[in-house]
Image (cartoon, helix red, strand yellow):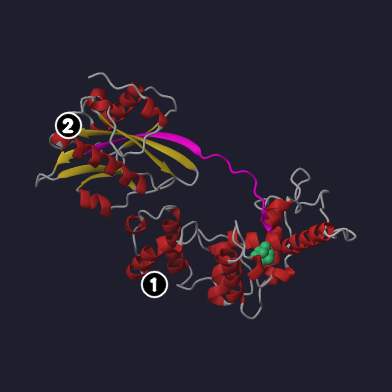
Amino acid sequence: MLQQTQVATVIDYYNRWMQKWPTLQALAQASLEEVNELWAGLGYYSRGKRLQEAARKVVSELAGRMPRTAEDLQKLLPGVGRYTAGAIASISYGQATGVVDGNVIRVLCRLRCIGADSSSPAVIDRLWDMANVLVDRSRPGDFNQALMELGATVCVPKAPLCGECPVKQHCQAWRRVEKELAFASQNLFGKPLPVPDVEDCVGDCPLCPPATEPWDSSLGVTNFPRKASKKPPRVMRTATCVLERRGCHGAPEYLIVQRPSSGLLAGLWEFPSLPLAQDLQEEKEREELADHLQAWMGRPVAGKGLQFIGEVIHIFSHIHQTYVVYSLHLDGDVTLDPALSPSRWVTEDEFHASAVSTAMKKVLKAHKKQCRKESSPVKSSKRKRGAGSACPGTQLSLRTFLRAPTAP
Ligand code: SF4
């Protein structure tokens, strides 16, 4: 749970998870649906899925016994990579094996002035070698946690507390900064200038800074680590429709469908959605969504009948997703094609208790805002732009902001 996620966010999820599935055997019996429901909102959903798959494997194929070495953990359990394997083996089973996470990368790159791209295979391999050599043989778990904690609290990314650092005497980046300071002060008082003995290696070494990006004195120890520039996130547009009907007690119900069991947000529930090509005209987007709903419901759906709610932006780790949100009120029931994805009608409470992503919760929120706006007598007089109007408070894209009002 803590991969890519802060402790404060995780605590509540962790407690609920451990209450519900206190043992591997209990987790092995859970369904993916239950796992997704508990995980809803935590993001990176494949983590929960893999955790449950791993529990099943331990129970059904490994006689309920967890693998105890980093090599076996990584080899036998789905979702367990090099870091997780090292952390479990050293902390839980006392194996003298290192760990390398983002904090450790920062500390080691500074300790050894490693200035090449810290995500390159050559640097990563060297960091693992270093971690495996450095780890304390008698207390590997404590050592690894201390090293990660050093990176999280002292050797932090922007303003490291070098003066308080317990390993500064071993730190080449710190020594280089100290030498530069001494060099500068001697220069100031007119003393003879010693030649600094820290040399830049700019040959073919795969660990040193590239010749084009030498040490920058103004950055001090934060010259390290260095990263190649990140790939920009993929931009995606998806049309989504909040299909609503009156339930038996008059309360609204919404139709949700289940996503495929693999890929992004696997197995989660969402409003009927359709990925869109970029730069599609609004009218075309609307028509495509109407066609999609029509094929699905087996009855005519007019594009003009879809009410435009607004655009909801959600940033996944590698995707900049824009949901173009519409709504459609239905009278009576609809017969859905059973050959398509599983679907069900839910009340608002049931929606929130279901395995739905944070993005879909934002979509429902935008829809509810629009409904409140429409039922408000004061504001409704301003609501003459019909289907083209957007909800107040919804995060608007530039495209929506600049869109000409739809003709009444
Ligand atoms: Fe990090 Fe500074 Fe400690 Fe070096 S001396 S490990 S740069 S905090």
Ligand 1 quarter of the rendering: bottom right
| Residue at image mark 2 | 380
Residue extending furthest right?
192
| Pointer 1 residue | 23
Mark 1 surroundings within 10 Å by alpha-carbon count, few (fewer than 14), some (14 through 19), many (20 or more): few
- The image shows residue 2 at horizontal and vertical percentages of 47, 62
Mark 2 lies on a secondary structure that is helix
Q: Amino acid at mark 2?
A: Ser
Name the residue at the bottom extreme. 138
Residue 280 on the magenta segment: no
Residue 231 within the segment the image draws in magenta: yes
Q: Quadrant of the N terminus?
A: bottom left
Q: Which dot, 2 or 1, sits closer to the camera?
A: 2
Q: Position of residue 213 (x, y in %)?
A: 74, 45
Count of marks overlaid on the render = 2
Q: Is residue 5 above or below residue 262?
A: below
Looking at the image, which residue is at 64% across and 81% down?
138
User: Which quadrant of the structure image shows residue 286?
Assistant: top left
- Residue at x 27% of width, y 44% of height: 365
Name the foreground residue: 395 vs 30.
Answer: 395
Q: CA distance from mark 2 to mark 1?
A: 54 Å
2 or 1: tag closer to the N-terminus = 1
Image x and y of residue 362, in percent = 32, 44
Q: Secondary structure at mark 1?
A: loop
